[in-house]
Image: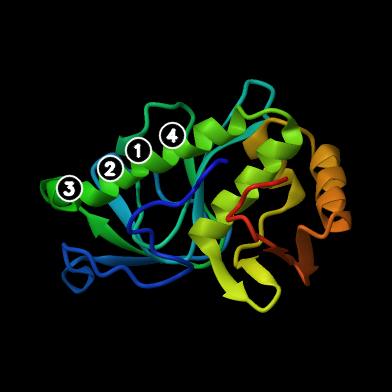
Amino acid sequence: MYSTNRPGNNNSFSQNTNNPSSSSLPQRLFTRREVIPPRNDVLWRIERGAVRTLTWSEDGAFITLGYWGPGDLVGYPLSRVKPYQIECLTSVEVSVLPPQMWHQDIEALVSHIQQSEELLSIVHRKPISLRLWQFLVWLSEKFGREVEQGKLIDLNVTHQEMAEVLNTTRVTVTRLLQQFEDEQTLVRHKRRIILRLPNKGGRN
């Protein structure tokens, strides 16, 4: 059984309260689909909203590297991947951390490494149905909230974006999501997904 629980994980879009204090740092606001500027002299701590980090292949196919929410640190100094981009999936508020303050957020830096490894592990799972299910569970742990029918992923991730994470096709993602719905392990609510997780994310 694969677990995606992380100690100290902040659920949904809650405000981060770790040091250094958000109130003492410069703040920036970005709109949905806006790209965070490629600066090598700062890290961005997400206070509200969600972003994804991504690159693309020679033929222009997007490759998603991670999904990040409140409390997470992102920034161009954290990656050697070229090209590299940080795209806002919602409206986003960030605090700007200069290099002399990075050491004060060691917990968030360690969390960045752990989450990257978790996602890397998931995208190599087989078969693809297990890979997709565990990715949905991972999203629900990071961006989910409990509702009457199960755990709602409070983030709109398109079928194409899922395919870009999992190295598969949009058609395959659509087919498998329908299969999960037929199996009653997944419920669609408007443009959101609700997972029914009686065994904490495992599929029988």
Instruction: State the CA–CA distance, disc 3 to disc 1.
Output: 15 Å
Mark 1 and mark 2 in contact? Answer it, CB < 8 Å: yes
Image height check: is 144 above or below 158? below
Cα separation, mark 1 vs mark 2, equals 5 Å
Q: Which of 159 and 140 is in front in this view?
A: 140
Disc on res. 110: 2
Q: Residues within 10 Å of mark 4 (few under 14, many from 20)?
A: few
> Where does the C terminus fall, quadrant-wise?
top right
User: Looking at the rendering, which quadrant does residue 45 occupy?
Assistant: bottom left
Q: Earlier in the sequence, mark 3 or mark 1?
A: 3
Quarter of image, res 132: top right
Give neighbour class at mark 3: few <14, some 14-19, many 20+ (Cα, 10 Å).
some
Q: Is residue 48 left or right of residue 136?
A: left
Q: Mark 1 points at which residue?
A: 113
Q: In this view, does 186 lie to the left or right of 116?
A: right
Disc 4 marks a residue whose amino acid type is Glu
> First in sequence: mark 4 or mark 3?
3
- Separation of residues labelled 4 and 3 (CA atoms): 21 Å
Which label is found at residue 117? Answer: 4
Q: Calculate the distance from the C-alpha at mark 1 to the C-alpha at mark 4.
A: 6 Å
Q: Is residue 153 left or right of residue 103?
A: right
Dots 4 and 3: beta carbons under 8 Å?
Answer: no
